[in-house]
Image (spheres, rainbow, N blue to C red):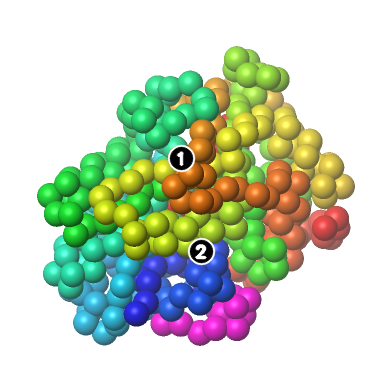
């Protein structure tokens, strides 16, 4: 019996595969590699010393998804596969609705047909929009402000309705806050491809010399130092949350939603400061205008996951910065070693 990991070659999926294999789960990975490289999964094998099936499948194609269920004995699914760039979702909304929702509907439909009715779904803190005051609890009113967030809200609703219609269906919805960092080995990490949208990959590309400076988006928010505050969570803590979610599914009916965050908020300037301290590398930055659509503050109340999943984030912000840097400095171009751009020599951790 295996766990099917969709989107398993991606950032969160690849780290979760390591965690699953180390906990002796059998896995099958499917991905269309639209935002990832097969190399990440080769490295998962290197880290764990285990091999597992990897099949190129686009989840929008139902027949290909069904072939996987014909071929393998699947016991549960962790569904990571989705497009996730907020800005792109505004300009290519149809692509986002098609990719994220048709993929979900196909996998659920095939699962139902094969009586595989346990799923862990990747949602996001983005579903809270700008509604609640942090720390955010799961019952906070939701309201997405972009098509990407809408796909997550719609997906959550589909899973809730499915469990309500049939008690055999068990689902866990995980609302991630801001995943950062990399596996402690430095062999796998976040490889955004192109100009990173998110703070940590941008910051580490500045550190490695690929970008001249970091733009800090706004310094006039009502926060501790005026810059945006987020709940950064180490990717391996997040990965561990998925194993806990699978264990929870074995004994719990219905659809359950959990925040996965640390409960602590750090500002952009604090992130720069800690990164510099941990790595010894200066990060040039400039304060610029706010980025459209950003909110001032967003951090989790993680108590529900602590209580019911028996999960808690244990790694510190220093761990997150150290592991980000180990990955970035030993893989300056992510999974593309051939790039000719000049980089600084790695130092620090
Ligand atoms: P990622 O882009 O690194 O991984 C997603 C993977 O899904 C990629 O390997 C991609 O090739 C694959 N994929 C996309 N569409 C597919 C399709 N139609 N068929 C098959 N494979 C497909 O992203 P990630 O950061 O690992 O995110 C994983 C999940 O977590 C996503 O659902 C994302 O929305 C969600 N999430 C991510 C963050 C974050 O900050 N990284 C935050 C909250 C939620
Ligand atoms: N920031 C900068 N400069 C940058 C990038 C980001 O100052 O170059 C700031 C942002 O303004 C924000 C903070 O750093 O205050 C974090 O920004 P990210 O882009 O890293 O993360 P967001 O919280 O904006 O969004 C991310 C994902 C969303 C997801 C959300 C919650 O991009 O998809 O976390 O999980 F919904």
Comparing marks 1 and 2, which lies closer to the viewer?
A: 1
**Which residue is at the front of the view, 298 or 333?**
298
The residue stretch that appears in magenta: 41-53
- 25 is higher (above) or lower (below) than 326: below
Horizontal and vertical percent position of residue 98: 24, 51
Q: Is residue 28 left or right of residue 230?
A: left
Horizontal and vertical percent position of residue 149: 35, 38
Of mark 1 and mark 2, the one earlier in the sequence is: 2
Identify the residue position indicated by label 2 in the image: 16
**Which residue is at the front of the view, 208 or 299?**
299
Instruction: Give the residue displayed 24% in from the left and 63% down from the top.
Output: 117
Decide: few, some or many residues near mark 2? Use Cα within 10 Å; few <14, some 14-19, many ≥20.
Answer: many
Identify the residue position indicated by label 1 in the image: 304
Decide: few, some or many residues near mark 1? Use Cα within 10 Å; few <14, some 14-19, many ≥20.
Answer: some
Instruction: Give the residue displayed 70% in from the left and 20% down from the top.
Output: 225
Instruction: Give the residue displayed 50% in from the left and 55% down from the top.
Output: 241
Confirm or reject: label 1 Cβ below 8 Å from ligand 2.
Answer: no
Instruction: Give the residue displayed 40% in from the left and 30% down from the top.
Output: 128
Do the CB atoms of the residues marked 1 and 2 lie less than 8 Å apart? no
Is residue 204 something that shows in the picture? no
Q: Label 2, secondary structure: give it.
A: helix
Horizontal and vertical percent position of residue 101: 24, 51
The quadrant where residue 282 appears: top right
Residue 4 is a magenta residue = no
**Which residue is at the front of the view, 199 or 128?**
128
- 20 is higher (above) or lower (below) than 179: below
Quadrant hosting ligand 2: top right
Q: Is residue 5 left or right of residue 322?
A: left
């Amino acid at each position: 019996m295996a766990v099917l990991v969709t989107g398993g070659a991606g950032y969160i999926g690849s780290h979760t595969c390591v965690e699953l294999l180390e906990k002796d789960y059998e896995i099958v990975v499917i991905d269309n590699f639209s935002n990832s490289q097969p190399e990440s999964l080769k490295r998962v094998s290197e880290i764990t010393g285990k091999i597992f099936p990897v099949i190129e499948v686009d989840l929008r194609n139902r027949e290909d998804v069904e072939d996987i269920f014909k071929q393998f004995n699947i016991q549960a699914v962790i569904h990571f596969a989705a497009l996730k760039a907020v800005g792109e979702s505004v300009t290519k909304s149809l692509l986002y609705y098609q990719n994220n929702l048709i993929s979900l509907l196909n996998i659920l439909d095939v699962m139902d047909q094969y009586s595989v009715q346990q799923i862990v779904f990747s949602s996001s803190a983005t579903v809270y929009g700008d509604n609640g005051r942090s720390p955010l609890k799961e019952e906070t009113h939701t309201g997405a402000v972009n098509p990407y967030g809408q796909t997550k809200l719609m997906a959550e609703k589909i899973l809730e309705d499915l469990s309500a219609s049939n008690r055999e269906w068990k689902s866990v919805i995980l609302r991630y806050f801001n995943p950062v960092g990399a596996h402690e080995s430095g062999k796998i990490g976040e490889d955004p491809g192109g100009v990173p949208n998110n703070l940590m990959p941008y910051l580490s590309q500045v550190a490695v010399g690929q970008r001249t400076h970091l733009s800090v988006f706004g310094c006039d928010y009502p926060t501790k130092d005026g810059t945006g505050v987020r709940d950064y969570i180490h990717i391996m803590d997040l990965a561990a949350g998925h194993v806990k979610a699978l264990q929870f599914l074995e004994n719990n009916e219905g659809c359950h939603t959990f925040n996965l965050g640390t409960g602590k908020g750090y500002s952009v300037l604090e992130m720069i400061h800690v990164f510099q301290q941990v790595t010894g590398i200066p990060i040039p930055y400039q304060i610029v205008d706010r980025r459209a659509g950003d909110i001032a503050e967003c951090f989790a109340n993680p108590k529900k996951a602590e209580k019911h999943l028996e999960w808690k984030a244990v790694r510190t912000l220093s761990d997150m910065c150290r592991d980000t840097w180990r990955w970035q400095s030993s893989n300056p171009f992510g999974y593309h070693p051939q790039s000719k751009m000049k980089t600084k020599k790695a130092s620090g951790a």
